[in-house]
Amino acid sequence: MKSADRPLSPHLQVYRWQLTSVLSILHRATGVVLSAGTILLVWWLVAAASGPDAYDGVQDFLGSWIGLLLLFGWTVSLFYHLCNGIRHLVWDTGHALDLRSTYTGGWIVVGATAVLTLVAWIVGISRWVS
């Protein structure tokens, strides 16, 4: 095989995804999503300060299926970034750095994200309906 025929990055073809690398990538991605979601929050706050007509317009958008989808994604991102940030703070103290603890902590982050997101949405929807 000539050197020109060989792939430039063979590791990308045989690489097996690991929980730690996926969580690291997700941590960065959720930081970007939170930044973008902050624009939504600012829009809502400016509308609230601008008067009832502007506020009703934003509420109509946020109550639509696309608005709810964006809010759900922002909520998941918020809780994931929070939980994974706490995990990183634990690592900063020099604890839970062995492989088993790293994976256990990763799964705890995933579970806590799911639980916190569900609780927040259940509470939010129950208050919205009543």
Image (cartoon, rainbow, N blue to C red):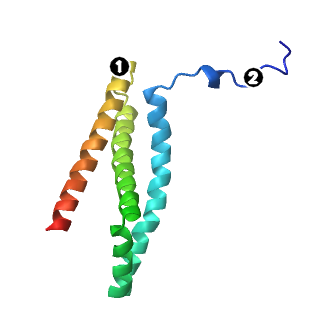
For the C terminus, the image quarter is: bottom left
For label 2, the residue is: 7
For the N terminus, the image quarter is: top right
- In the image, residue 55 lies at what x, y percent? 35, 80
Residue kind at label 1, given as amino acid type? Arg
Which is more foreground, mark 1 or mark 2?
Answer: 2
Q: Residue at x 28, y 36 (%)?
A: 111
Q: Which mark is residue 100?
A: 1
- Examine the image and state in which quarter residue 69 appears: bottom left
Q: Residue at x 47, y 54 (%)?
A: 33
Residue kind at label 2, given as amino acid type? Pro
Q: Earlier in the sequence, mark 1 or mark 2?
A: 2
- Examine the image and state in which quarter residue 72 appears: bottom left
Measured along the vertical axis of the image, is residue 91 above or below residue 57?
Answer: above
Measured along the vertical axis of the image, is residue 93 above or below residue 7?
Answer: below
Q: Residue at x 75, y 23 (%)?
A: 7
Q: Residue at x 57, y 22 (%)?
A: 15
- In space, the residues marked 1 and 2 are separated at their CA atoms by 34 Å
- In the image, residue 124 lies at what x, y percent? 22, 61
Element type at mark 2: loop
Relative to 32, 118 lies left or right? left
